[in-house]
Image: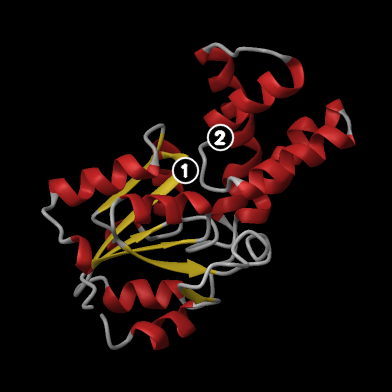
Amino acid sequence: MKIKNIFFDFDGVIAESVSAKTEAFREMYFQYGEEIANQVVDYHIKHGGVSRFEKFKYWEKKFFNKDLSEDSVNELAKQFSDLVLNKVIVSKEVPGVNAFIKKYSKELNFWIITGTPTSEIEIIAKERGLTNYFLGIHGSPKNKRYWTEYLLKKHNLKREETLFIGDATTDLDAATFSNLHFALRENEENKEIFKNYDGNRFKDFFEFEENFKNNI
């Protein structure tokens, strides 16, 4: 295969920001007790790429039998954003990713596809000095399956030339749905979830580049 297009997830792929979001969710629900907070964290880790809007709807229904209005969901999402935005902006890069992006951005086509709201990920990418390396930055409320298909069709991309790099089950799901190549970025939080995954995997972008240098 020869890769010409790469879709990057953000948290856990570009930035080491997964734990910042995990702790923010824990903080929001700890007021209801440690047991609920632990269930929130467990669900978040197992459904890493699902948007926060869907997670809040699920938790509020499960724990409090509430069917949230759009305004209520947006208010919870704002509280979460206030807790986590700066933590994500200043989080460490996944080792080697910035050098990789800068090295290959002129010969490959790059996009970000994430569960983070589009308006928020645009701010984060700008603050981290990444915006100009990507042809587009896309997040919720649209899901990852929507964005993979949208970008393939809009830019007339060949599926066999397109790779999705992710660290969550939703990333693998979107890649599978759109018949794309997939590479798993391993981290501590997804190790158990992907213990039976036997496809491409890497720990940092030095290893990724070594593994894929003949295909890019």
User: From the viewer's perspective, is residue 46 above or below residue 119?
Assistant: below
| Quarter of image, res 183 | bottom left
Q: Residue sitting at 28 percent across and 57 percent down?
A: 179
Horizontal side of residue 70 vs 59, given as left or right: left
The picture places residue 204, in percent across and down from the top left corner, at 52, 77
| Disc on res. 63 | none
Please state which amino acid type lies under the numbered disc 1.
Answer: Gly
Mark 2 packing: few (<14 Cα in 10 Å), some, or many (20+)? many
Q: Residue sitting at 57 percent across and 69 percent down?
A: 186
| Quarter of image, res 69 | top right
Residue occupied by mark 1: 115
Residue occupied by mark 2: 52
User: Dots 1 and 2: beta carbons under 8 Å?
Assistant: yes
The picture places residue 130, in percent across and down from the top left corner, at 37, 60
User: From the viewer's perspective, is residue 149 above or below residue 28?
Assistant: below
Q: Residue sitting at 59 percent across and 14 percent down?
A: 68
Residue 21 showing in the rendered view: no
Mark 1 packing: few (<14 Cα in 10 Å), some, or many (20+)? many
Upstream in sequence: badge 1 or badge 2: 2
Which element carries disc 2, helix, strand or loop? helix
